[in-house]
Image (spheres, rainbow, N blue to C red):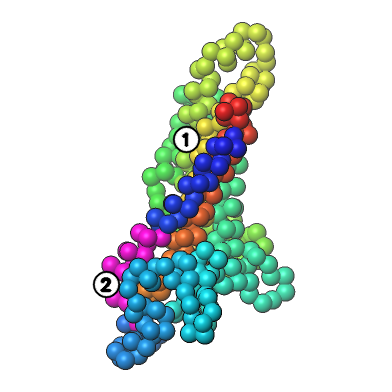
Amino acid sequence: MTGLLFRRFIWFFPVIIVISLITFALMKLAPGGPWDRDAESKQVDPRTQKLLDQRFGLDRPLPEQYLRYMVGYINAKGSFECGVVCGNLGPSYRQRGKNVQDIFFGVPEGDGRNFFHSKFGYSLRLGLLSMSFAVFVGIPMGVISALRHNTSVDYLITLVTNVGVAVPSFVVAFFAIIVLAVGLHLIPVVQKSWSGITPWIVPAMVFGFGTLAQTARFTRSAMLEVMSQEFIRAARSKGLGERVVIWKHTVRNMLIPVVTNLGPALVGLITGSIVIENIFGIPGIGRDFVLSIGNRDYPLIMGTTLLYAVLIVLGNLSVDLLYGLIDPRVRSE
């Protein structure tokens, strides 16, 4: 098990390097630049653009720009400015005076403020709540659907899950706002405060609906497959009660393939919240990422991409760990 995790971890660095190279190349191939327009959308004169390029090192060759960002460089004072390898994601071109890591993880001043009040904290909170909704509702739905196979309950759950898989989350979000905010006035159209759990209920349910549907379908398929195995028939032939057969033998073995899907699903919820954050006005990373693309804020684009890449790799690593904890065969290997 340790060897498996070590081999997985070794791939962490090549994956990050490849993703950073691809992102860097795509940014440079895109038309336009960060100084084409100022904050008031006015044309920046060529002399000012040249001075800004010199200040941020954009006048240097592309390989040198990449190494300066990832590894570091010697500044005008002769000291070494470490790059991404030291956790420094660089200064934002648009949010002057702020480094990207401060934009992501900085906590605003105020009473009771903590990590979850940072931009990444808001995105993480939305992802965790959506995942909790998907798991604690989706897995029971899948189990019930399998136990009531080919009945009206099974057909109803299958219909709901098919809708959840087919309909994009932003469509569900607009529908929820129209019905719950405009029609029934149960929630505000624009949320002013994100303190407490109440403001997060609708965004988490909307965002987690697709993952819930996928989890329920995956659970149903895994449950039906396990229920058709010989050891389940053997357990019933020994006279074991149906509850023991279902919960001790079927559900436990069904969880093995289901867990492998939860890690990437959680990462997908955290990294895929860009659209939902903009629709509900959640002050997470997604809103800054959308603006950074339009403004050609290269460090913010690179920083967001690298952060998401790290989360994806760690998510896959956590799946391998959970898989080993659940399946003794993996531990023995």
Q: From where the camera sits, is residue 206 visible?
A: no
Residue drawn at point x = 58 percent, y = 15 percent: 232
Tell me which corner region of the image, top left, top right, bottom left or bottom right, holds residue 300: bottom left
Relative to 150, residue 179 above or below: below
The kind of residue tagged 2 is Pro
Circle 1 is placed at which residue position?
A: 217
Circle 2 is placed at which residue position?
A: 31
Residue drawn at point x = 35 percent, y = 68 percent: 63
* Distance (Cα) linking label 2 and label 1: 43 Å
Q: Is residue 93 left or right of residue 77?
A: left
Q: Nearer the viewer, residue 148 or 19?
A: 19
The kind of residue tagged 1 is Arg
Q: What stretch is highlighted in magenta?
A: 20-35
Relative to 203, residue 34 above or below: below
Residue drawn at point x = 42 percent, y = 57 percent: 17
Relative to 255, residue 96 above or below: below
